[in-house]
Amino acid sequence: MRVTLVDIALTATAGVSVAAPERATVKGKAELPVARDAWEQPVVPASGLVGSLRAAAAAHGVGVADRLFGAGIGRDEDEDGEATGCSSLVRALGTTTRLPTDAPVQSRMQTAVDRTRGAAADRMLRRREHLPPGTQVHLYLAVENGSPEDVAHLRQLVAGWRPSLGGGRSTGLGRADVTSARMLVLDLDRQEDLTRWLAASGPTSFGAGPGWQTIKVTALTGLSPGVLALEVDLVAASDLAVGTGEYVEVSPGRKAAELSRAGGRPLLPGSSWKGLLRSRCEFVLRSLEVQVCDSTSVAGTCGTCPTCLLFGWTGRAGDTGAVAARALLVVHDSLVQAPDGSSPEEQVRDHVAIDRFTGGARSGALYSEQVVLPGAHLTLRVELPETVAGWALPLLWAVLADLHEGYLGVGHGTTRGLGFVQLRQPQELDGWRDRLRAAVPAMTAAPGGGGDA
């Protein structure tokens, strides 16, 4: 009997959010804490990683994926019409997770916007925790009684794997690289290999020792096959404020609403961009008499219209069949910086509520917030499949045109003049109306995109 051990080292290039909803519900807020072990240390479970590896194996053929990772009963039938299935050759022995030095678990506040009121939807505030970029994860696998061909398939699969970890992938989370991989083949008919196998268990089997073979990992750069990127450079035309929901002390005895940051610099999270884009896409499509659902209505998302296809959807309790689908596009975070690439100028703005009776300042209603001053630069990056780019790109350019013209803003305080941005190269918008008109038939032909608005 032969056992093949595989040790795969991953490094997160973006935040990683492997949620543990069973740990939720803190002070009435809907929380999405990261998974932790019995010692309260963050952990990336092996199950999600193996799922990502199986998805990559499917690109090599269904037979390869089923052979390595098993096939459920009922997947197919044998000659006698009996349901068949097989267990996985690959067995996950566990993972280890290590955060970067002095980089704690991070969190972001998110909410949904009511399409009718234009304000935060009721009971939709939630906090999502995520592990910081640079987090290192080791995945430990074992293949028992695998043929040389099976081992060769797994080796090839690991060498070209582009892993995705956890949730929030459509807002830029979960990206990781395979930084190294190694393999050890043990022949349990040999006394020394059998002793080595029995003397350790789980991840402890992967310590230093002779016989390890390095798997040459392919350095994956650029986009995945079949994916396009829309990248637009923007400049702040007004103050920008996207807060964390927390307050930070800016001077003795004075606190202000804190800006979202990454590496000490302000940023607009991909989740904020995604909500803005979806809301405006719904508006544009209805203006073109393409039927779309209201993603914040009590009825919930339909799961078939163009915006559900692009931005994903979730079902409601009692639904039958599929309960959700991930977005086709990915909207990345936008780091806000000065034109020379340094930290942008910031300021603390003071505000006070007005007493409706006296017309003066209301007692105890003074508050402050951190803002980024106009002139700062940022880049919006959206990735989407080529299969929908023919109609999705003109739709996104229509939203960017509205953004440039000041019909909508991003972040907090847009009704008070905050959050307006413009394209640094406005000529990129040339001809957007013609492109949008030409794309209407494809939008109508999209799933659920009927013309009855």
Image (cartoon, grey):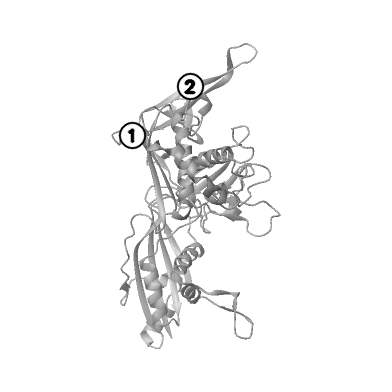
Identified at 54% across, 20% down, the residue is 352
Q: Is residue 113 visible?
A: yes
Give residue 393's position: percent from left, percent from top. 45, 45
Q: Earlier in the sequence, mark 2 or mark 1?
A: 1
Q: Is residue 260 visible?
A: no
| Left or right, residue 315 beside residue 164 | right
Q: Which residue is mark 1?
A: 343
Q: Secondary structure at mark 1?
A: loop
The foreground one among 119 and 174 is 119
Furthest-left residue in this view: 340
| Left or right, residue 154 beside residue 114 | left
Snapshot quadrant of residue 74? bottom right
Give residue 98's position: percent from left, percent from top. 41, 56
Q: Which mark is residue 350?
A: 2
Q: Amino acid at mark 2?
A: Asp
Identified at 38% across, 68% down, the residue is 158
Q: Amino acid at mark 1?
A: Ser
Contact check, label 2 and label 1, Cβ < 8 Å: no
Q: Which quadrant is the C terminus positioned in? A: top right
The foreground one among 127 and 319 is 319
Q: Secondary structure at mark 2?
A: strand
Indicate whether 128 appears above or below 344.
Answer: below
Q: CA distance from mark 2 to mark 1?
A: 22 Å
Indicate whether 349 appears above or below 379.
Answer: above
| Left or right, residue 215 beside residue 453 | left
